[in-house]
Amino acid sequence: MVLGAWPFAANAAPRPNFLFLLADDLRPDCIRALGHPVIETPNLDALAHEGTVFPRAVAAYPICHVSRAEMLSGTSAFRNGVQYRGAAIDPALKTWAGTLRAAGYHTWFSGKWHNDGQPKSRGYEATGGLYSSGGASKERLAQKYLDHAGRPATGYTGWTFKTDDGKVELEKGIGLTPITDRHIADGAISLIRRKPAEPFFLHVNFTAPHDPRFFPPGHEKRYDPAKLPLPPSYRAQHPFDHGNLTGRDEVLLTKPLVESEFRAELAAYYAEISHLDEQVGRIVAALRETGQLENTVIIFSSDQGLAMGSHGLTGKQNLYEHTFRVPLVFRGPGVPRGQTNFADCYLRDLFPTTCELAGVAIPDTVQSRSLAPLFSGKAKFIHDFVVGYYTDTQRAIRDGDWKLICYPKAGRWQLFNLESDPDELHDLAVDFNSLGEYEQTVPKFSDLRHKLINWLTQNGDPFAATLAPVRPSFEPEPGKSVVMVFGAGAPVGVPFTAGLTVGQAIRAAQAPAEKGRATVWRLDGRREPLDIAQLAAKKIEDPKLEVGEMVFVTKSK
């Protein structure tokens, strides 16, 4: 696929450099410029103010190595072969760095490598500050490895820094340390200072704010745990098994969450983000000092977000917005300044975007789409909707303000209206406040379910067929004769018997309707309003119901 070279044709401006800065487990709301009330991120704020922010960007598969494989290949996990338990990226696929290198770019890497092989086997010509698994002796591995709270660390055990020719740099530490990201930034800066005649693509993978967490030097008292606001959707525990309740990330802290312990973790999380921000500032300063800043497109994002207490979860293995969404900022030549673009996009779209900005042909193996038309104004959106997936336990679709999540193993759906409920606290698939809400919700649910299953099927999801049998709670169980009662929390199917009345159905469902009103939705489409107080007092006849009719109990304010 050969694209017009917008806006850097060979006879126009020189091709831009690309600096891709990737955080690890950074929530989309944890940058001050993106709305966080407490966190201090002046360098990331500057990038956001000087560039374009994409607040609806997503990581389709929220787990480190799978998300990164999507970025490296420009394809979904269903195409590139990298699933939760890991596999090599399909060698038939062109890679991001390999494509730019073939087009004359220097391709450099610094930081966390969390995919198969090594950077040089994936198109990068040189590394600086490479941080990867292995390299520590058994004796060193046996030493205690504790996080900021004195808990045994379970991540990055035995990881070390390596030189470009593969020598282990034990002096920089084993596992994560409070200054791992400083070493990664040092490696990136050393590459920037090469200042080659040809353009470069520098990919920098930080480790922060992934666990195990430590307070970087000078940040020990930066955030007072007692004064930190809790995430808006903070809960002590998740209401059901979403597919990872016993996973490593979910057992890092006491469950149900203990607020004092959680606040201490939140302070460390924010401290690591502020330290990360400082490293971003150092790297940008190196570009400025070497005269390369104005011809460099800077891209900042994270491999996925993180629950970090939201919905009672601590990990990233979920498809709520705090984890599905990622911060995404572009800054540099050809990028509008000071803009927010609400188009849906994926992290895997970054590969073809840089190709188009550089006038490089996008490989035929790439499934994702370039965001460059959004910068030029040639397009208002790129995707009609976005889809997320995690193992065989979760699938999701977000279309405009609506979000549908399926948990095939748990046998349930969730539906959210993100305009009225951005924190996803009111699940419309189980909780209707009114008949009007039902009439709005059910058609939307059906539309999203159809789109989701079709997309998964067309894109080779081996578990696509597991979604169709999952029955939403507002649908009667097949073959059962019931009257559905809404307003008691989750919808209740009351077994139908001849002569069943509205009052009997409400009492059987234990709906809180002693006072207030109810509406019966008759089979012929009529709406029959009822005064429950009068009904209870026998001042009016208790109407009889027919099988398949519905009763909506108005909730008290």
Image (cartoon, rainbow, N blue to C red):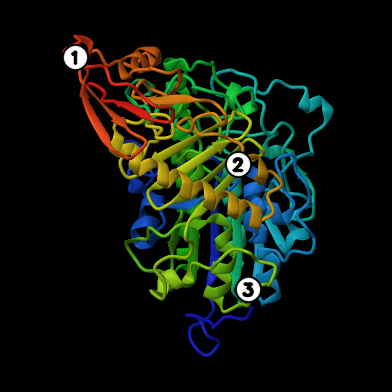
* Residue type highlighted by circle 3: Ile
Q: CA distance from mark 1 to mark 3?
A: 68 Å
- Residue 116: where, in percent of width, then height? 77, 49
Q: Which tag is nearer the camera, tag 1 or tag 3?
A: 1
* Residue type highlighted by circle 1: Ala
**Mark 1 Cα within 10 Å, few/some/many (few <14, many 20+)?**
some
- Looking at the image, residue 498 lies above or below residue 322: above
- Residue 134: where, in percent of width, then height? 78, 39
Helix, strand or loop under label 2: loop
Please give the name of the residue rendered at 49% of the width and 22% of the height, measured from the top-left corner: 239
Mark closest to the chain's N terminus, 2 or 3: 3
Q: Look at mark 1 in the image and give the residue it sits on.
A: 533
* Residue type highlighted by circle 2: Ala
> For residue 373, what is the image quadrant?
bottom left
Q: Which tag is nearer the camera, tag 1 or tag 2?
A: 1
**Closer-to-camera residue (326/492):** 492
Q: Look at mark 2 in the image and give the residue it sits on.
A: 468
Q: Look at mark 3 in the image and give the residue it sits on.
A: 362
Helix, strand or loop under label 3: loop
Q: On the rendered structure, is 488 left or right of 391?
A: left
- Residue 424: where, in percent of width, then height? 40, 35
- Looking at the image, residue 510 lies above or below residue 211: above
